[in-house]
Image: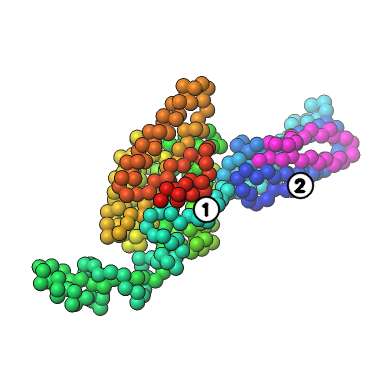
Amino acid sequence: MQIKKTGVPSSVGLGEIIEVKMAGMITGGLGAVVICDEVPEPFQLVEGSNYKVVSKEVKDKAFSFSYKIRCTKCGNHWLGTGWQTRHILGMTHTQISKDDLRQLRVFPALAKIEKMKPLVRMTTRTKPSGSVATIGSLSTDFKEIRDYLYGDPFKIINWKASARAACRGKRYPLVNEYEKEGKASIWLFLDADPNIRVGNSIENTLEYSVRAAYSISRYFLGEGYSLGMYIYNHRGELVHFDTGKRQFIRIANRLLKLASSRGGLQVFWDEGFSRAVEHNQRYLITRFPRIVVITHVTSRSYSDLLNGVRKTLAYKRRRRQPDVLVINILSYSNIPTINCIEASAAKMLDMASRSLSDQLRRLGSTVLDWDPKKETMEATLLSAMQLR
């Protein structure tokens, strides 16, 4: 028996519909052949059927059929073909075979976030040309006079200002700080805690977190930023700082694997955001990146998230403005409700999460409450821009 499958691309976007075509040849013999083209469980069959029953004849017989499916879940999925042969009198044993495995990668849809200038509150420009890194060679553009720190070169000491400060009793010298050449940095923290995966198998907090991380990393890397990522409450997966298309491919691969994961995840249950910040403090201290945290704020995780935000602000105590963005995904609307009481309970849980977000804002961090059921990521960012 020969089967050929066509119409399956290597990658598609979330929500796209693809048409799978099957064709083949059945060798002669009396009986029937049941052909099944396996479809990933979360996908939706929108047209046709992925099953086909063909009656066998003495001569070889050709067959063909097609069907359409909607890709409703991000991740790496496999489509395999199986068939079952049956003798007309049951004289031979049933044979089952699987072949022609095809991998289908479903990527999240990109949000239209070209105007993402106010995403973080540290600058009015998002281009790397106007927002340089904290490492790299020194330029000739003067920035400010600050206290001497261990490791500063002696050539940048401002001796006149240090002498005047010494007359006022200041013990340490002052140095001239110059703008540094290079690209600005973004560090992305992604929460993968199973306890906050509210919703169903297709629409849940993790799915929306992956979509948000995918869009944000695509935007910043496309603008020339250097971006790194750390997935906490999972395996502590780390993607080091880098730029360009290759870095985006690395991050996209990690996100697809995370979205494809099922039960039995290797989870650091007690890691939390605060400990994740400690694990990555060398990157936060040496490069002073702008921090984006994608999570779901609950009463259980709030205190740990608060401590982590305080630590990041402490690392950046010499910066004029904080640059920590927390994207709080409100996903209780994904919970199926039977009556108005359950619907009211879901709204109350969302309100409780929003109140915790207000407390994080008092620290100076930017918090965006995103309800994926009611608005897109683009609408959330644009509404935040209008409030400023």
Q: Which residue is drawn at 10% across and 72% down?
A: 167
| Residue at screen point 44% across, 59% down | 227
Nearest the camera: 9 or 79?
9
The amino acid beneath tag 2 is Lys
Colour convention: rainbow
Q: Distance between the residues labelled 2 and 1?
A: 41 Å
Q: Which amino acid does label 1 sit on?
A: Ile
Circle 2 sits in a helix, a strand or a loop, which is it?
strand
In the rendered structure, does residue 189 fall within the stretch colored magenta? no
Can see residue 261? no
Is residue 281 shown left or right of residue 255?
Answer: left
Location of residue 25 (image quadrant): top right
- The part of the chain drawn in magenta is 45-70
Relative to residue 292, is residue 303 depicted above or below? Answer: above
49 above or below 9?
above
Per the image, the residue denoted by label 1 is: 113
Q: Please identify the residue farthest to the right as the structure is shown.
A: 59
- Please give the count of numbered marks on the rendered protein: 2
In this rendering, would 145 be left or right of 180? left
Quarter of the rendering occupied by the N terminus: top right
In the rendering, at what x and y percent does residue 120 appear?
40, 54
On the question of residue 65 being in view, the answer is yes
Sequence-wise, the earlier of marks 2 and 1 is 2
Residue carrying label 2: 4
Asked whether 60 falls inside the magenta stretch, the response is yes
> In the image, which is nearer the foreground, mark 2 or mark 1?
1
Q: Is mark 1 on a helix, strand or loop?
A: loop
Q: Where is residue 318 in the image (x, y as percent from the top left)?
A: 27, 60
Task: Depth check: give the residue in front, 337 or 125.
Answer: 125
